Amino acid sequence: MKISINSIKRFRRFRFGALLIIPALSVSAALLALAPGRALAQIAGDTASKPATPAAAATADGKKVSSKNMTLKGDTVWTDTGVTVEPGQHIVVTAEGKLRYSDAKEDNGPEGLTRNFKDLIRILPDNAAGRGALLARIGDPDTAQPFVVGAHKNAVAPVGGKLFLGINQASVDTGDGSYTVKLEIFAGDGNAVREVAKEVTSMPGIDNTLFAKIPRRIADQQGNPGDMVNFLVLGDEAQMKQVFTSAGWVTVDASVESTILAGAIASFSKESYLTMPMSPLYLFGRHQDYGWAHAEPITVVASRNHLRIWRAPFTVDRRMAWIGAATHDIGFERDQRNNGLTHKIDPNIDLEREYVDKTLSSTGYVAEVMHFTPTNPMTEAHTATGGSFHSDGRVLILKLSEVSATK
């Protein structure tokens, strides 16, 4: 049985809310001293490092599937549209209206207010967008990534699920007013064939002979054992990249420099923390081929879902195999190797394994899903930095669709 993470993810998202208390002037100075380009870009509203969102230049030439008009009140963050969309369908939104925030000098429309310095410390559904901007999200609220629709948007649904419209604001800082929205859903153009992931109990090549070739844990450069290998992806490199980017994950480079402290100080918006480099860890004698990170919908800045993957030096049933270790950052702790500052991970790493499953399986690019328990499964251990973790020992296997990756 798969673990249900709806309520657990919501709980763990908020339990580490107060991680660092730094005087405002010190933070401002640190922003400019440690990452001046990033700080100024954020103030100006730079979104270059945000995860890919549905295409803005899409056309809706397909048959209209549904249409409705609705009103979004300024005292509500998210509203269920009652519409379920399929991957590849076009979502066309046209909105008008005004909101007014108590500390704002003027009204704003669905495009939202111009971002300012205070937006660096606000926790909004989309911290890269202006307060009051009209948003949308699709699917599970614990995994769905909000994207801006503004006054008009023609977007292609990257995943399937319930469609929600929202206002980019905190629940304790709502606007006075409302938006009137016309929502239209059109059939896709047929160029992207999507599948519903099928839960299976076996796959060719997935057995203990395979896992005898895969180390159970990754390691740091000194060989200290660390995170557990907890998922495999079967598919070529283009397919692997497609499924992660479609699910809202972004690539993060490995860095040989210590970036934890700088990130803790400079990352007062979640997109900058999301793209902060990951330290290099090792499997098959080399550091990760890719690092991927995923922002939580509304979260403290020190929390991100992230994973590292390595291309295996062998194939599985003649398919390329990617071996991964996924963990969930929930704060910072002392590195027991050197007394430095490092990420603290949620010790229940199975939640992150299921988070990977949920986000990737919803894209329509996963054909089959299974969980495999190797002989002598790992259930408890410590990371290379000294933190503890526990697991039921199962490894997630995701077999990607044979559909060719789009360019």
Image: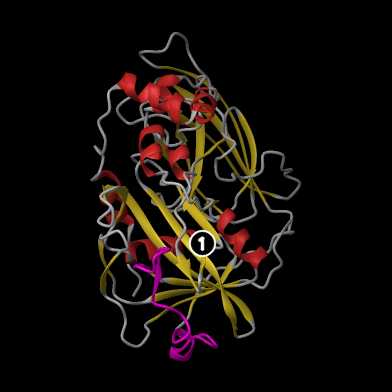
Quarter of the image that includes the N terminus = bottom left
Given the current orientation, which residue lies at the most extreme bottom position?
A: 209
Q: Number of callouts in the render? A: 1
Q: Is residue 194 in view?
A: yes
Farthest residue in the top direction? 105
Residue under the image location 36 percent in, 40 percent down: 261
The percent position of residue 399, horizontal first and vertical second, equals 56, 74
**Residue drawn at (51%, 30%), measured in percent from left and top?**
38
Q: Does 7 sit above or below residue 318? A: above
Image location of residue 385, percent across then percent down? 30, 58
Membership of 105 in magenta stretch: no
Q: Secondary structure at mark 1?
A: helix
Task: Tell me if residue 75 comes above or below residue 81 in the rendering.
Answer: above
Mark 1 residue type: Leu
Magenta-colored stretch includes residue 204: yes
**165 or 114, nearer to the observer:** 114
Q: Which residue, given by chain and number where applicable, does mark 1 sit on? A: 360
**Closer to the camera in the image, 105 or 235:** 235
**Whole-percent x and y of residue 381?**
26, 70
Screen quadrant of the C terminus:
bottom right
Q: Please determine whether, in this image, residue 178 is positioned above or below residue 245.
A: above
Q: Is 204 situated left or right of 207 in this image? A: right
Residue 214 against residue 134 in the figure, above or below: below
How crowded pointer 1 is (Cα within 10 Å; few <14, some 14-19, many 20+) is rated as: many
183 or 159, which lies in front? 159
> Could you tell me what secondary structure mostly forms the magenta stretch?
loop
Residue 99 in percent (x, y) is at: 45, 19
Q: Is residue 227 left or right of residue 240?
A: left
What colouring method underlies this structural image?
Answer: secondary structure
The magenta-colored residue range is 202-227
**Residue ID at (27%, 75%):** 379
